[in-house]
Amino acid sequence: MLRFIISRLLQAIPVIFIVITATFFLVRAAPGGPFDAEKVVLPEVKRALEAQYKLDLPLHEQYFAYLSDLAQGELGPSFKYPGRSVNEILFSGLPVTAELGFYALLIALIIGVTAGVLASLKPNTRQDYIPMSLAMLGICMPSFLLGPLLVLVFGIYLEWLPISGWGSIPGDKILPSITLGAAYAAYVARLSRAGMLEILSQDYIRTARAKGLPEWQVVGKHALRGGLIPVIAFLGPAFAGLLAGSFVVETIFQIPGLGRFYVQAAFNRDYTMILGTTVFLSSLIVLFNLVSDVAAAWLNPRLRSQLSGGGQ
């Protein structure tokens, strides 16, 4: 198992390096700059600002300087928030984004696992077709469409729930969490159904049923552990995707998370903020992928024994 973890970490290093390099040069290639504004800036002031942030150096020197700072854990100063580092800004918005991602993942698991398990118990019947059709609808409907629809129905017409903010009004976390978690609930439902169908066809499940065990015990005690392995493997990238994909939802519902800073950084050409957020989220995706792979391997006895044998 240790060899497996080390191998995955070594594979992640070139991936992160490619992401950093591609993002650095693509951001620099975009038209405009961090100090281009409607208000005219004196040439000497602009030169002083560029010198302060090392933008007067050749591009390759800027790149290696950024890599040097990154190796020390420094993401650099923000161009648009004087006196604040990217590290400080990221960690000020991360708790809100992480909380939103957690609630969205919880909704996705509750809805998705329930729908997938129910559909697997009676395949190719109405009990299967209805939740899977809704799952396909959830996959096809983007958050920038679902969010405004939920706001229109539950916030404006019915006036049941607030339509913006985070943590200041009771119930203001419900609509953003549903909007963000709906697509992932659909994926979880399909994965749960596929995993449960495979496990329910195994010999030991037929043996358990032949012994006269109640269906709830066959499903809950014997089938769920193996049937949900695909869902466990999906949790890592799902949570990372929820963090990275929350920008649209945070913008729709005016949530003060990472999305607000990232969107503003893109408009303002805040190079270090764009780079820092991209590197941070890429690292989280790699980390959560590794954690989910280890968890899935641990739950799979055959794969666990192979990895344990290979690590000895």
Image (cartoon, rainbow, N blue to C red):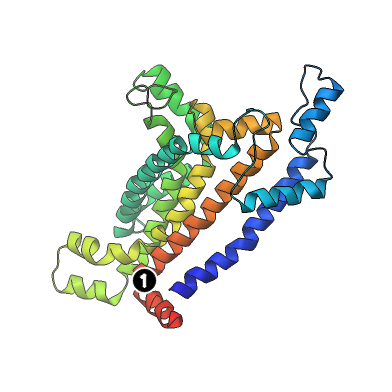
Q: Is residue 271 left or right of residue 110?
A: right
Q: Is residue 108 left or right of residue 23?
A: left
Q: State the residue at coordinates (41%, 52%).
A: 188
Q: Position of residue 140 (x, y in %)?
A: 52, 43
To which quarter of the image does residue 51 belong? top right
Q: State the residue at coordinates (45%, 73%).
A: 2
Depicted 47 relative to depicted 137: above or below = above
Q: Position of residue 256 (x, y in %)?
A: 49, 29
Q: Position of residue 39 (x, y in %)?
A: 78, 16
Q: Is residue 55 left or right of residue 170?
A: right
Report the residue that reaches farthest toward the right: 43
Look at mark 1 in the image and give the residue it sits on. 300
Q: Position of residue 186 (x, y in %)?
A: 43, 47
Q: Nearer the viewer, residue 302 or 189?
A: 302
Depicted 138 relative to depicted 237: above or below = above
To which quarter of the image does residue 167 belong? top left
Q: State the residue at coordinates (78%, 26%).
A: 36
Q: How many marks?
A: 1
To which quarter of the image does residue 160 belong? top left
Amino acid type, callout 1: Asn
Q: Nearer the viewer, residue 259 or 21?
A: 21
Q: Is residue 274 visible?
A: yes
